[in-house]
Image: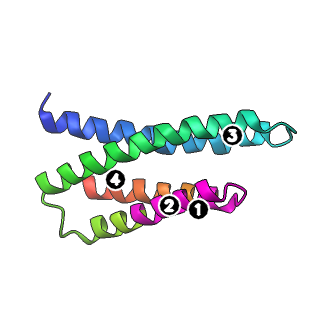
Amino acid sequence: MTGWEIVTWLHLLAMAFFVGGQMVLVAAVVPVMRGEENREQMRAMARKFGIGSAVALVVLILTGSAMAGHFELWSDWKLHLKLGLVVLTIALIAWHTRRPQQHWLEGVVFLLSLAIVWLGVSLAH
């Protein structure tokens, strides 16, 4: 296994945590917890996921930057679009942490995350 395979593996693992965690929240946690009067459990899960997501985002930025340099992708328009969506996603996450009652932000972040993954797959080919 080469060093770049490890970097790619870390990037994919962080992406799987970030996007996969959102999928679990969307598909299972929110629908099950929606009717609960005490929403503290859902808030606690969201906080824990938020901490893990912050770590995943750092790993994604570090490994993505390294791969973009190594594979000479900095001039690719798809990378520019992906980075723009990443910045927008981070801004929306920050907004959502200040305004958690605006649930539409969760959906937008999820859709942007899926678009970012699509662009990443496109860049890898």
Alpha-carbon span between mark 1 and mark 2: 6 Å
Of tags 2 and 3, the one toward the viewer is 3
Q: Earlier in the sequence, mark 4 or mark 3?
A: 3
Q: Which residue is mark 2?
A: 112
Q: Which residue is mark 4?
A: 121
Residue 76: assigned label: none
Residue 121 position (above or below residue 80): above
How many dots with numbers? 4
Dot 2, crowdedness within 10 Å: few (<14), some or many (≥20)?
A: some
Quadrant of the rendering where the C terminus is positioned: bottom left
Question: 105 or 6, which lies in front?
Answer: 105
Q: Nearer the viewer, mark 4 or mark 3?
A: 3
For mark 1, give the secondary structure.
Answer: helix
93 within the magenta span: yes
Q: Earlier in the sequence, mark 4 or mark 1?
A: 1
Dot 4: element:
helix
The residues bearing labels 4 and 3 have C-alpha atoms spaced at a distance of: 32 Å
Q: Position of residue 51 (x, y in %)?
A: 49, 39
* Residue carrying label 3: 43
Q: Quadrant of residue 13?
A: top left
For marks 4 and 2, give the CA distance: 14 Å
- The answer for how far apart the CA atoms under marks 2 and 3 are is 22 Å
Q: Is residue 36 left or right of residue 85?
A: right
Magenta span: 86-106
Do tag 2 and tag 3 residues touch (Cβ < 8 Å)? no
State how the image is colored: rainbow
Q: Residue at x 72, y 42 (%)?
A: 30
